[in-house]
Amino acid sequence: MTTAAPEAATRPHERNRRYLFEREGVLGPLLLLPSVAYLLALVGFPLVMAILYAFTDITTGNPALHFVGIDTFKAALADPVTRTSLRNTVVFTLISQVLVVVLSVVLAFALRANFRGKWIARFLILLPWTTPIALGTIAWLWMLDSIFSPIDWVLSHTGITSPGSHMFWLGRAHLAMGSVIAVQAWRMLPLATVILLAGLTSIPQDVREAAEIDGAGFWRRMFGIDIPLLLPISAVALLFGLVFSFTDMTVVFVLTRGGPQNATQVLASWAFFRGIEGGSLGEGAAVAVFMFPVLAGLAALILRMVSRAEVS
Amino acid sequence: MAAIGQTTRPGGGRRLRTSARIYTVVGLFALVASFPFLWAVVTMFKTDPDLYNVNNNPFLYNRPPTLAHIKLLFQQTPYLTFVRNTVVIGILVVLITLALSIPAAYALARLTGRWGGRLGVGIFLVYLIPPTLLFIPLSRMVASMRLQDTIWALVIVYPTFTIPLSTWLLNGFFKSIPRDVEEQAQVDGYSRFQAFVRTVLPLALPGIFTVVVFAFTLTMHEFIYALAFVASSDHMTISVGVPTNLVRGDVFFWQSLMASAVIVAVPVALIYNFFLDRFVQGFTMGAVKG
Amino acid sequence: MAVVETRGVRKVFVGDTPAVDSVDIATEEGEYLVLLGPSGSGKTTLLRMIAGLERPSEGEVLIGGRVVNDLPPRARRIAMVFQSYALYPHKTVAQNISFPLAAGGMPKERRPERIRWASSLLGIDHLLERKPRQLSGGERQRVALARALVRDPQVFLLDEPLSNLDAKLRTSAREDLKEFQRRVGVTTIYVTHDQVEAMGLGDRIAVLDKGRLQQLGTPREIYHEPANTFVATFLGSPPMNLLEHDGALVGFRPEHFLPEGLVSEREGRVPFEYQVDRVEYLGSDRMLYGTIPAIAEGVKVIARLPFTVTTPVAEGSPARFAVAESSLRFFGKDSGDRIAPQPLRGVSA
């Protein structure tokens, strides 16, 4: 588009600066600018800083950025709690998400049919997810209490354990880990189920009917058609679940504060205790940075799945 | 032939068995999922002697129920302050989110070509960046802005996760609105903005409402930033105030704790149930190209 | 009333293939110009660029002599009717029609008169209080036209407005449209993929394919003097027969392919041995499908005999047919462009 000479142009040319903001090329970026700028400032910038801090000895008492190379990392690695946290995080994430995957598949298939009382069932099943995480976990605090746990009560009154015995769900290392994993699975199951259900209902009816006509029975249909078609969406759901569980600390914090003796400490909670409560921002950042490689890997996987979905 | 004979017979019998199977499975899950809440509902009315007795059946009222603990919750704890803070922060965050994500979503849906798709995915992926990675530098940023220990720290940080999600949802909703009525308004004499307000917004209201609900509940659920940035109970939200503040020393006021959880959980769950289908719809529409 | 011009207009969306590739068109005042082409030919994109809903990647759009590239639709004094009619669903017919007047800032008192004028012109006065969902397809179209008219535009743009109507309704709607435009006399640009519509409505037709202008001319010119094989085969149903011969393409329309005896020697009769495979009786015509083995083995050649031609033709047997020399068209084998006539050698049986 040539700009005409200011005066005598051979063809009259409308100089339209007042319509400038309506042009697609201008308006689009303009409308996106606030959100992008905001996210760059409050996510992009902190992300970079999060990694940088790990190379400093910054504390809340001494907030100057003083680069110390990998000394902070070394200190973090030398700390046995860091290594324990790393191991715990992996265990916590993997087991809870495997549980979620298996259970959500079962539940999604069961919920596919329409039956009376479905609304109530759905309401109850969604409760763990619709409640603020911290509050739902509090209810579990009492359920797993060392003295008054109703679970203990049921166990001893049905004879499974000796009368009056206590399991100390949150007091014993392995049981505490199990409890934390169970609560995490409990609260993430509804979301995974909803996603799978959405995927299930999007399987075209005629594919299933054709299989029925071809003589495929219930189980053959489930494993031959439904599950393969569900794979992409459940893979994405699983990846999301892995990312959230790997980096979350809410359940651990509320239930056990990382105890007993760091048996349930995960990277995220440890980073919090060291960095924010303890004030050693650099060390906290170093611990948090350990999450980064796994996170980046998972994010790359998600990106690849999403772009593959785009193409199809 | 054999196939026909097979299908006619089990019509009633098989369906009955399947129903029973489904009811059992669903019932089990529903029980496990809701058990803590159902039990919390029972607990919140229990008197102390009833509750703190190991020999009592925890599921029944061995002594008559009481409202005393609920009164305690409202009158002698900062609970109402928490509620007020949560609501105020929620409203502010929703407003900020709408102000930023409606234009962004519109731009992504209508005004960008190929690079728009990628940018949309990119914005959405921001949602995946974990707060536990960002909370340390953010706490420093919040402190340097002198917002430490105020609700404003949360107001400016919460949109980092509501905006990506809202933009994605709204993008899907806007895309599903056909362009021709909007373009007709432009040809008929309205500017882009006026055409948008008059033709697109009315049709997008359900989607916007859904976004409001989910942004508000995301804000209400958030724990990590609230824990990291706010220390004094005057400025806490429900999510972080209840676990940290209603536990005084080693004494847990259990009945009040349970009440505080249930009071919040039930209304939110009801609202979520209404909007869930819409949410899923908008989510998947955001993924459909063009 | 104004002249619309496009100069070197080009639009690229994604990738390298342009949706519209350097199109030059100029309408005449008050003319009804049809943009005709298959889907993907760029005709709608071109129309949208004229309307201002898309911005040309290159080139200029002029309306009434002014370059309007930088003007949004509302500043161009145009009216547009979309394929779906885009009626505002929550407004009555009267409110729909007055919408552009409100947008343009016309004072409320003057609007009813304009609305009455437009609606009586289109015969929809009795529908003014109804909502779009209560109207039939044909009625909706007339509301869309009334709304377009009410702004007193200098150009009308119509994007396939008849394709949503039943086939039966389309013919009468076509008539109404032409009548309407004649009365109002506004320059109209009309997009369609239906060549019958184009021929029936257009003062001139611009044939587009793959974003490029293939030919611009009156219906007669386009039909009888096609500029290339695309135009030759796109217009006419069934399309022009094309046979490869002697390094070129020879074409003749099915209605010009007649039994030998009906083509006079004086017109320069070119005889062909026509192997008839199938005869279709369609009432007003007979459609013959066959081949001319002497020129092109296996290439389908169609003949259309009006009912006035009673020559018996049998399936499976050869027949002696001919084409008048003046009805033959020649095209370059690779380019498809029209070339000068060549003598046909070794053809007659």
Image (cartoon, rainbow, N blue to C red):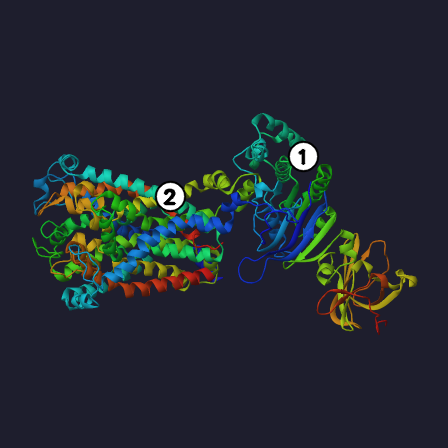
Camera-side mark, 1 or 2: 2
Residue A69 versus residue C156 in the image, above or below: below
Depicted C60 relative to depicted A81: above or below: above
The reply to whether residue B10 is in sight is no
Distance between the alpha carbons at the discs numbered 1 and 2? 44 Å
Instruction: Tell me the subunit letter for badge 1.
Output: C
Q: Residue at x 78, y 54 (%)?
A: C221
Corner quadrant of residue A251: bottom left
Which residue corresponds to the image point at 71% horizontal and 69% vertical from the top-left? C334
**Numbered disc 1: secondary structure:** loop
C-beta proximity under 8 Å, tags 1 and 2: no
At horizontal 59% and vertical 54% (from top left) the residue drawn is A2
Q: Indicate the position of residue A255 as horizontal and vertical percent values.
A: 16, 53
- The amino acid at mark 2 is Leu
Q: Position of residue B288 (x, y in %)?
A: 46, 54
Q: Which residue is mark 1?
A: C122
